[in-house]
Image (cartoon, rainbow, N blue to C red):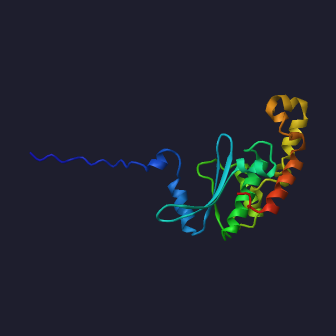
């Protein structure tokens, strides 16, 4: 008696897709551009910005900056807010320009693309460093948010202060955040990624 074997149509997804680390459909589109990717990620404590070039043997990181590096430029405030994201993107962009990267495409992975969010702030920093990255102008946050004026105002408001800020943030100099931002930005621009 002949029994026909049933073939399963289930396809096992790639491991990194299953783990929620790589969106392969988006990745293929970015690789077709032939340009390096500005990869922006947020951890529980930091923002990471890196310029990555595809290579069949394995992607090559051309420039990498963790927002923890901002401390060497006098940044004492939080490492994952909008101003920190901008400064991280700016420093990564300056390092990438030093490696002859002129154009890139944005890669935010599985992050939700909220308008004017932290990833857009990092993107604006990289663009201000001189890297050409396609983006709609209404996507980028305004200057007062990038410089942290909204955080500064909330910090100075006693009602909001009790709800939004911890005791540790009192020591971080948030009452003068926009000045600290301007100083750190000037140091990054003048030192130009020679901090390592």
Residue found at the very far front of the displayed protein: 196
Q: Position of residue 160 (x, y in %)?
A: 85, 32
Q: In the image, 163: left or right of 51?
A: right
- The residue under the point 53% across, 53% down is 23
- The residue under the point 11% across, 47% down is 2
Q: Can residue 116 be seen in this view?
A: no
- The residue under the point 75% across, 45% down is 81
Tag count: 0
Q: In which quarter of the image is residue 90?
A: bottom right
- The residue under the point 85% across, 58% down is 186
Q: Position of residue 125 (x, y in %)?
A: 75, 58
Q: In the image, 143: left or right of 32?
A: right
Q: In the image, 169: left or right of 113?
A: right
- In the rendered view, would you say 187 is above or below 20? below
Q: Position of residue 167 (x, y in %)?
A: 81, 30
- State the quadrant of the C terminus: bottom right
Q: Position of residue 45 (x, y in %)?
A: 68, 41
Q: In which quarter of the image is residue 97?
A: bottom right
Q: In the image, 126: left or right of 177?
A: left
Q: Can residue 41 be seen in this view?
A: yes
- State the quadrant of the N terminus: top left
Task: Pick whichever, 100 or 30, lies toward us.
Answer: 100
- In the rendered view, would you say 80 is above or below 165? below
């Amino acid at each position: 008696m002949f029994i026909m074997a049933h073939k399963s149509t289930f396809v096992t997804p790639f491991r990194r897709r299953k783990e929620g680390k790589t969106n392969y459909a988006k990745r293929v589109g970015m690789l077709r551009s032939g340009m390096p990717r500005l990869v922006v990620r947020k951890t529980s404590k930091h923002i990471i910005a890196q310029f990555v070039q595809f290579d069949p043997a394995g992607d090559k990181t051309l420039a990498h900056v963790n927002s923890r590096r901002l401390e060497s430029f006098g940044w004492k405030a939080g490492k994952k807010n909008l101003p920190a994201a901008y400064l991280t993107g700016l420093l990564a962009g300056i390092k990438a320009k030093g490696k002859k990267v002129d154009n890139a495409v944005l890669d935010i992975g599985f992050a939700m693309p909220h308008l004017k969010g932290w990833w857009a702030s990092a993107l604006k920093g990289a663009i201000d460093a001189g890297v050409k990255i396609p983006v709609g102008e209404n996507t980028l946050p305004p200057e007062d948010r990038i410089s942290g004026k909204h955080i500064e105002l909330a910090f100075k408001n006693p009602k909001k202060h009790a709800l939004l800020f911890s005791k540790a943030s009192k020591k971080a100099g948030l009452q003068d955040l926009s000045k600290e931002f301007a100083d750190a930005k000037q140091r990054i621009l003048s030192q130009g990624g020679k901090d390592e």
